[in-house]
Amino acid sequence: MERRSAHRSESAVEAEAYLGDPVALGEAFLEKLFLDPVRSLGRRQLFTGCAAISLAWARRKARAGEAPAYWVRLAALAHAGVLTDARIEAKDPEAFAQWAIENFGVEQLWATSMERQEAPRWSPELLSEVYLRADLNAQAMLAIQNMPFGGQVASWSKIVEGEAMSDLASRPLGLLIYPGPLDDFGPPPNDVELAEWETPPGGATTLLGLLDALPFCAKIGQPSAATVDRLIGILTAERDFVSDDIDRYLTALNAVADMSAAGRSVRLSDAVLDRCTTLLRQQDAQERIPYLLSIAVTACAACEDRKAYRDRFGAFFTSTAFRLGDETALSTLRQIIDHMLVAERRMAPELGRARLIADYKLRRAP
């Protein structure tokens, strides 16, 4: 035991002589990670852009072999990391990220939406710069907290905690707790009681009244049975409700769809899809049809059985094509179906019917 302790001490001395002061090295690393504009913000922006490109590339390559989403995403994110390292000296990473999102973002959005049945707790926004920053904060804080008692370095904690408090002050709490890009393939998370995250607890009786709590709860776990029953009751009561603030209402509805997918709750999915159907009668909701359809796709992912998912998916898009009468809305639906078929051609039988109906109605339009 004494010889092993002596060996460790000698190794530490040798490492310090070779590398320098480990405390100073740690400070330099954390400053580069969080405070250096090129190595922190610029790297995150580069990775966001590279991830959009890599995911599009990997999915195209994987389609022929029908590789599972887990393999595709792992390969794409590893490739994005290599590209980020290669372009770290890029002069305008923000412009590059914007270009990548403009050119590949739509494909990534609908491809990820089509993967929700296989990976229900993840979405493209989790690769944005702000979420990457939050993930770095969380990982660094966890590493420092796991250091042996008495071995934590105050200057390291100051940098990391200061950055985390900056995030907490400027962004929603949900940014600090969310599933990682491979977490949604693991075991289901713990149940979440919605009432514990609202103020006052259990006081809201409308979807908009729960807007502050819903997105956070959607990210940290699956809804409890009581939460599912409560949300179904609210959506049923609001079935014909016309909101004056459609954007905020769709944000809340999207969070409920996320919860239905994460918890594999077909009952909650039914309520969300029914609400989406009634919203299609509302003119300002039709103007936001891409968002409304992405909500519906997420809700369909509540079906764990692949055939049930495809049947539900196809039925909703077919009925939507029947219901829409506005030429602009039908054209948008047709474009979205095309994007989905590029992402997942195996859904052609389900989406084909909706596309034929939309094409027929557009040809007959005056």
Image (tube, grey):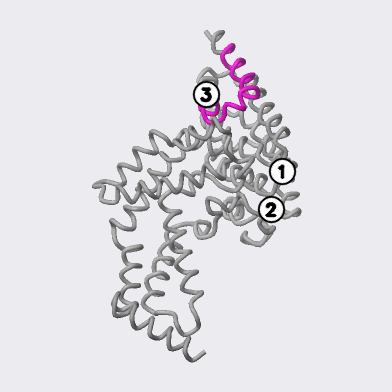
Look at the numbered disc 1 and give the secondary structure of its residue. helix
Residue 253 versus residue 26 in the image, above or below: above
Residue type beneath disc 2: Pro
Does the magenta portion include 353?
Answer: yes
Does the magenta portion include 80?
Answer: no
Q: Nearer the viewer, residue 312 or 227?
A: 312
In front: mark 2 or mark 3?
Answer: 3
Which numbered marker is on residue 116? none
State yes or no: discs 1 and 2 in contact (Cβ < 8 Å).
yes
- First in sequence: mark 1 vs mark 2: 2
Which residue is tagged 1? 268
Q: Which residues are magenta?
A: 338-361
Query: Which quadrant of the structure image shows residue 70?
Result: top right
Which numbered marker is on residue 338? 3
Residue type beneath disc 1: Leu
Q: Nearer the viewer, residue 284 or 321?
A: 321
Please give left or right for residue 266 compared with residue 365 in the image.
right
- First in sequence: mark 2 vs mark 3: 2
In x, y percent, where is residue 179?
56, 54
Which residue is tagged 2? 223
- First in sequence: mark 3 vs mark 1: 1
Seen at 72% across and 49% down, the residue is 228
